[in-house]
Amino acid sequence: MALLATTFVVASRLMGYAGAIQGAPLLAAEADSAGESRGTVVDEVVWVVGDEPILKSEIEVMRIQGEAEGMSWGDDADCRIPEQIAVQKLFLHQAALDSIEVSESEIAQGVEQRINYWIQLPQIGSKERLEDFQKKSISQIRQEMHDDYKNQLLVQRMQAKLVEDINISPAEVRAYFKDLPADSIPMVPTTVEVEILTMTPKIAQEELNRVKDELRSYTERVTNGETSFATLARLYSEDPGSARQGGELGYMGRGMLDPAFATVAFNLTDPSKISKIVETEFGYHIIQLIDKRGDRINCRHILMKPRVSSEAVEQAKHRLDSISNDIKDGKFTFEEAVTYLSDDKDTRSNNGLMVNSTESERTSRFRMQDLPTEVAHQVEGLQVGEMSSPFQMVNSRGKTVCAIVKLKNRTDAHRASITEDFQVMKDVVTNHRRAEIIHNWVVRKIKDTYVRMNPRYATCDFEYEGWIK
């Protein structure tokens, strides 16, 4: 029996939604074997927020996804889930009014990271297992995740805009914690301070030549009209965030790009031309201009990363082992070795001390889970002042490097104090204030928004007041 398609137009059916809210399902015509058609329920509108419907299927999808990721909705899931979807729609509506945008490259990168996270789960383990589990190809999974991840970013940026002017004083922090019982003071987890010395394995000239020859061949194929730059980027670029978009990066300012990349990209004037080969910290690129708007540029690129041989890795580890022995013999300190020998420009001028950058601060303290995985594995077994053996890792720029680390300090878990952990306590107050501002904004927004829901939700104990009018 073939199901005949029935189009449901979202934007122009507000009065229709009101009828559906009273319990009327959305119907599709289904032809039976006798040629007659009958109504078949395919979904149901249970809420309307503004001119946006919330379907029963949306609620079920969120429930299933949450449970799959270990989220507990509690005993009130039937009320909490549709409310959460409704709140998201309020933020998305305001984001559209405020012209908040996210780039395609950001979306693609986030989706790719999420897919890679799923693949690494013990119960999945491979792309093939993920496709089998989802009953979809990786390409289909990416397409279906696109809008959800885009909306997630828009909501985050809208919320960030609402709380961007918060400024908490030390007096407010002290006042907030003054009368709190001891067991309400936050626990500060174990933190460590780590120094690192890195060495980049030498890449053979033959490998560099191979990469450059490949990029020159791509340029030649596009110039000859054999294929498009976007097609080659999808097939061969080693930048996962942009490859899925045909190498497109979205509109970016000069300061958002690697300096060497930006210099070449901003000098391009003809979209039909391809740049010379550009070397950056990430690898080697060729670039094609798409458009310029004032001080922002949109371009495509193909990135290739030279492969590091196992022999080069072993040579770098052997060199680090020799340096480590010289440090232990007292010929020089770890910090002196970093200053003269480390390849990591971010830590070289700071005696190798790694920096943990968050939205609220830059600190040398790391929780173990915030360290790069390879570094955390080494630090776990060290005593303060000890050095690790040489190991291999991938740095923040995607390059294979070898390293040794020294555990400079470890602070065990403890109750926060104003004198020792002021930033931790300030963050608690700041987050409380943010939550308060966002909650009040949602309540005000509800008052100014058309809301209609199925009567069965009228008895819900919602987080935000004002839904039931």
Image: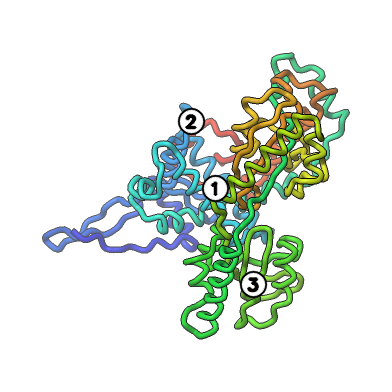
Marks 2, 1: nearer the viewer = 2
Residue 23 visible in the current orientation: yes
Asked if labels 1 and 2 touch by Cβ distance under 8 angstroms, the answer is no
Q: Which residue is mark 1?
A: 451
- From the viewer's side, name the closer residue of 204 and 222: 204
Q: Which residue is mark 3?
A: 277
Dot 2 or dot 1: first in sequence order is 2
- From the viewer's side, name the closer residue of 346 and 153: 346
Label 2 vs label 1: CA separation? 27 Å
Q: Position of residue 129 (x, y in %)?
A: 36, 46
Q: Position of residue 153 (x, y in %)?
A: 60, 51
Marks 1, 3: nearer the viewer = 3
Residue kind at label 3, given as amino acid type: Ile
> Can you name the residue that lies furthest to the left here?
34
Q: Position of residue 353 (x, y in %)?
A: 77, 38
Label 2 vs label 3: CA separation? 51 Å
Classify mark 1: residues with Cα within 10 Å, few (<14), some (14-19) or many (20+): many
* Label ID, residue 145: none
Determine the image quadrant of residue 39: bottom left
Q: Position of residue 26 (x, y in %)?
A: 35, 53
For residue 273, above or below residue 91: below
Marks 2, 3: nearer the viewer = 3
Residue 361 visible in the current orientation: no
- 221 vs 106, left or right, is left
Q: Which residue is mark 2?
A: 72
- From the viewer's side, name the closer residue of 150 and 201: 201
Classify mark 2: residues with Cα within 10 Å, few (<14), some (14-19) or many (20+): few
State the SS at label 3.
loop
> Can you name the residue that lies furthest to the top here?
182
